[in-house]
Image (spheres, rainbow, N blue to C red):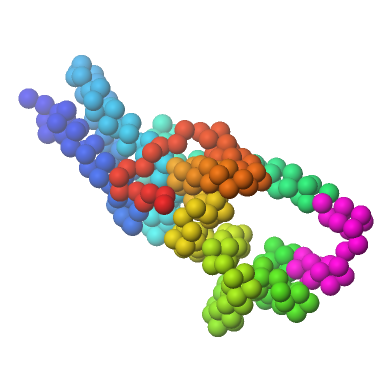
Amino acid sequence: MPPRGETAQDLRGLIGEAERLVANLRGSGPQAEALLHLLDRIHGLLANLEDTGVDLRAEMARLETVERLLEAKDVVLIGELRRAGGLAATREAAKPVPAQWWWYLDRRVAERRRQQWRRALLIAGGVAAVLFAAWAVYRYVFPPDPRRMAAMDKAGAGEQLLARGDLAGAAASYRQAAEITPEDPSLHIWIGVLEARQRHPQQAALAFARAEQLLADRTSYLVMRGMAWLQVGALDRAQADAEAALAANPDSAEAYLLLGSAFEAQGDARQAIDAFQQSAELAEKAGNSTLVVMARTRLGMLLQAGPVVAPLESATPVR
């Protein structure tokens, strides 16, 4: 009789435990590392049982589902292991071989993000070229408004300071721009975001209130603020604003585009794809061809990045 831990029944039990762990990965803490060791055990036992000629097709199909879902949740796993010193430190202690790919998910994520940044830079370059052409027409064909040009200069200075990490300087520049064109809600939103990032809640609240008053439309306000949160890396706040905008207006293509962007930045490709698809459909119904192109472009980039695994029932669905 085979020793304990060497039977197909034992294998099924281990795979069942892996299914439970991967389905509840978010917030699992130390159990995230346990999942990696569990996969080591499963593959070792699987190899031993294959040598005996046991039919393991059903078990291999279940294991493949677990592994595909783990790949889809790679960012979540890395986040959970960060509390224990990070996946790299955990891997160093375990000494896995390259074939044990689940120990190297951080490297896959890093490479995927490099590719996403390259694609984003290409898109940003194209957008910048279009904006520059539009600016040239505006600047040299139509007489510009000196007041707005001055505000744009101040806002541009604020953007450069923000890129260098100078939040206080950026906020001051945006305040100067808002003094010139106080009717521009985007300036007040940026003031609010920058003050919030500096932990100045009262100043942020005042700026946000002014922006919402100027827009007079809560959905537009939330989408505009969510885009700003997204640009400063506050992904949870960007997602929260997108969801609040959809609660206010479930047919907002702009809110779905924001939600998809937040999911994509968090590495949740499945939900990002769903959101971009809904954004494109709603934009098409509304006759917003520009937004249709934007949503479909983002959707196409994600689909070209590779296969996407559908989430388990425990995953949070897109609205």
Residue furthest toward the front? 286
Q: At which x and y percent is residue 292?
A: 61, 43
Horizontal placement of 85 versus 178: left or right? left
Horizontal placement of 218 versus 14: left or right? right
Give the quarter of the figure containing the N terminus.
top left
State whether residue 55 is above or below residue 307: above
Residue furthest toward the top? 53
- Give whichever of 170, 255 is nearer the camera: 255
State whether residue 281 is above or below residue 253: above
Quadrant location of residue 270?
A: top left
- Give whichever of 219, 82 is nearer the camera: 219
Residue furthest toward the left? 1
Would you say residue 195 is visible in this rendering?
no
Horizontal placement of 236 versus 174: left or right? left
Q: At which x and y percent is residue 106?
A: 48, 45
Q: At which x and y percent is residue 109?
A: 50, 44
Q: At which x and y percent is residue 234?
A: 54, 63
Horizontal placement of 255 versus 173: left or right? left
Residue range corresponding to the magenta coloring: 134-157
Quadrant location of residue 37?
A: top left
- Which residue is depicted at the point 38% across and 55% down? 80
Would you say residue 228 is visible in this rendering?
yes
- Which residue is depicted at the point 56% across and 33% down? 304
Q: Please say whether residue 98 is one of the residues in the magenta stretch.
A: no
State whether residue 126 is above or below residue 307: below
